Image (tube, helix red, strand yellow):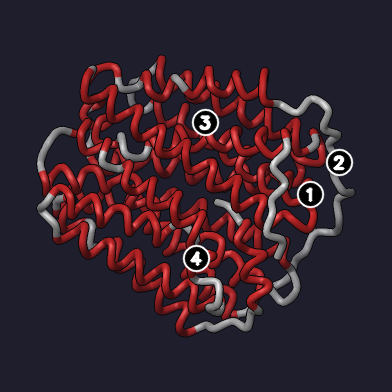
Amino acid sequence: MPRSAVRDRFFWQVAFQTVAINMFLGGFGPSQGLLREDQGTTGAQAGLHGTALGVAAIAAGALNSRLAHRFGRVKLSWLGLALFCAGLIAFILYPTYPTTLISIFVAGFGSSTVINSSLTMLNHHAGKKAAITISQANAVSSVGFITGTLLIGTIATNYPDKWRLGLFLVIPFSLFVYLFVRDKNYVDQVAAEQKRQQGKMSLKFWISWVGFVACIASEFATSFWAATLFKERVGGTSASATTVMLAFGIGMAVGRWYMGQILYRLHLDQQLLAVIGLQFTGFAIFWFSHIYAVSIFGLFLIGAGISTQFALASLRLIELSDGRPDHAVGLSSLAAGIAIALSPLALGLLDDQFGISRAYIMVPVLIAIAFIVVVLIPTNVSQRKVHEAEGISE
């Protein structure tokens, strides 16, 4: 695999588009406690915001191919970013429930469109260097997650009723990217639409698909509700609990940049088992801890463990698709949408019934499912393919 990435103006355009999206995700997910307090909702009602994001991801994935060939990938990415900003503005200006569900759906459709386009754009643009180029763009986007969490937490701590302004800062940043970072000379090229890959998948594929759902579900359950558990175990306000989610984002950023190099010599399945194990270790530390510093360390390990799971689990689905990678990727998008839609909602329902501490037991169950599926359904992927997959980005 090439050791150098294509880091030209178009690279930074795509990377900064995803930074904007991750600023939102990094701020919105951990702020669920703040939103719940503002709206006076139950855990299940608050969890429906995650459901809205998941449904939006499913819709965007289903329409992505058609829209890309209608508008071109680059133009579609800007349209997605504009739709994302429109939904975000509505969320800020109309904060009542359930109006926020609608605005989050709109923002989620736009953000998923940007994310879907970013992978295909850089894959085409970078050629043989696509893997490392996409991987580094993905690492850059993690800076947005960290920034979003820091902004929301800081504003909420100092101005409790103004925390939404942290999300609003995504709007001028997106405008800055369009006006000053955009590569105006880039010629968009979209290949002619090929015959759709269809057919039934094997039982092994569908079992691995369930494991993929478990991976994504554990990630979003953590992203949406870890701050609430931290507040209960360690104390403090919802604002301060939101800020500590920085450790989760930093863990993801570090993992995306270095994990592939650390686990370079391991087989695909061994790599995925290793990062799932790391996630479980971090969860155990976080769940049992009542100490501030220890809890933060646990969140960091969880983020590092989750960082490459999407890429590795996606490659397993492609390998088990019997030569139908496009079909496999489409089904993986469906799996991700289902996981995002259901996991925060399920955890919210359990929180209402048993409290967040007991409800959080759902997460290690998901981790165990993901681990067992990898053990039961092995693949035969060469190291070369594993390295090429380092660029697959959620």
User: Which of the two discs, 2 and 3, sits closer to the camera?
Assistant: 2
Give me the residue at 44% from left, 20% from top: 168
Name which of mark 2 and mark 3 comes first in the sequence: 3
- Give the residue number, with chain letter if any, for mark 1: 124
Q: Is residue 118 above or below residue 153?
A: below
How far apart marks 3 and 1 lie (CA) works out to 26 Å
Residue 345: percent from left, percent from top: 33, 48
Secondary structure category for the residue under label 2: loop
Instruction: Describe residue 326's horizontal placement relative to residue 252 as left or right.
Output: right
Identify the residue under disc 3: 107
Query: For the residue marked with disc 1, what is the amino acid?
Result: His
Marks 4/1 in contact by CB < 8 Å: the verdict is no
Q: Which amino acid does label 4 sit on?
A: Phe
Measured from the top left, where is residue 67 in percent x and y?
75, 39
Q: Which amino acid does label 2 sit on?
A: Gln
Few, some or many residues within 10 Å of mark 4 (<14, 14–19, 20+): many
- The percent coordinates of residue 320 (x first, y second) are 64, 76
- Specify the farthest residue to the right: 192
Q: Nearer the viewer, mark 4 or mark 1?
A: 1
In the picture shown, does residue 101 fall above or below 112?
above
Label 3 crowd (10 A; few <14 / some 14-19 / many >=20): many
The residue that disc 4 covers is 212
Instruction: Name which residue lies at 72% across and 33% down.
Output: 9
Q: In which quarter of the image is residue 381?
A: bottom right
**Between discs 3 and 1, the one toward the N terminus:** 3
Disc with the residue nearer the chain's start (4 vs 1) = 1
- Cβ atoms at labels 2 and 1 below 8 Å apart: yes
Front residue of 105 and 133: 133
Q: In this view of the protein, which residue sits in the foreground, 137 or 189?
A: 137
Task: Kindly identify which residue carries mark 2.
Answer: 189
Q: Circle 3 — which element? A: helix
At which x and y percent is residue 91? 42, 23
